[in-house]
Image (tube, rainbow, N blue to C red):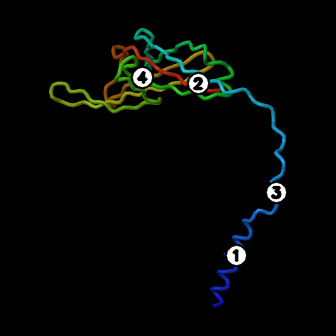
Amino acid sequence: MRKLTLIFLAAASIFASCQKVGPVGPQGPQGPKGDPASFSIVAVDVPQNAWQYSNYADNNYFVAEVKVPELTEEAFDYGLVNCYRTFAYDSNDASQIALPYVRLLEEVYDDDVYFYTETIDYEYGIGWLRIYYTLSDFFYEVDETLAPDAMTFRLAIAY
């Protein structure tokens, strides 16, 4: 009986503490209305001849730098910038993938299967975007003959 009484008192205090005590007060002052967020979508084409080979002894990659005027100082300081690699951009089979992009791929030569990774990442600053393209088969050294094809990227800039 004592347990039942304690349970009843606990339940009653929970329900009693949720009751409205008085009327809702007046609405407080409104702060100044801020500027609406700016949002830009920018297509960035990187032609094949834009890729530069790093030619480092142990870290070979390709890099392309593109001017992007929409990457303003305000976007750099206060915004968010996301970059996507697009595939078949102007077709019904279009797709995109967020960077960084790492994909395990395979090639068959003389009935042997060879695996490698393709990595694409980026960095940006005020007015520019750099795309890095790295191939690695974890054994053979990559050289300038493996320059990537032209690619299209999509930037989503919000600030």
Q: In the rendered view of the protein, which quadrant contains the C terminus?
A: top right
Describe residue 110's horizontal placement relative to residue 58 as left or right: left
**According to the image, label 4 marks what residue?**
86
Q: Nearer the viewer, mark 3 or mark 4?
A: 3
- Per the image, the residue denoted by label 3 is 23
Nearer the N terminus, badge 4 or badge 2?
4
Identity, as a three-letter code, of the amino acid under mark 3: Pro
Tell us which disc is closer to us: 2 or 1: 1
Element class at badge 3 = loop
- Name the residue type under label 2: Ile
Vertical order, 148 against 77 (above or below): above
List the single residue furthest toward the front: 23
The numbered dot on residue 157 is: 2
Lower position in the chain sequence, tag 3 or tag 4 = 3
What percent of the width, then of the height, locates residue 139?
A: 31, 29
What crowding class fits label 3: few (fewer than 14 Cα within 10 Å), some (14-19), or many (20 or more)? Answer: few
The three-letter code of the residue at mark 1 reads Ala
The amino acid type of the residue labelled 4 equals Thr
Side (left or right) of 46 relative to 38: left
Task: Verify CB contact (< 8 Å) between mark 3 and mark 4.
Answer: no
Above or below for 52 versus 159: above
State which tag comes first along the sequence, 2 or 3: 3
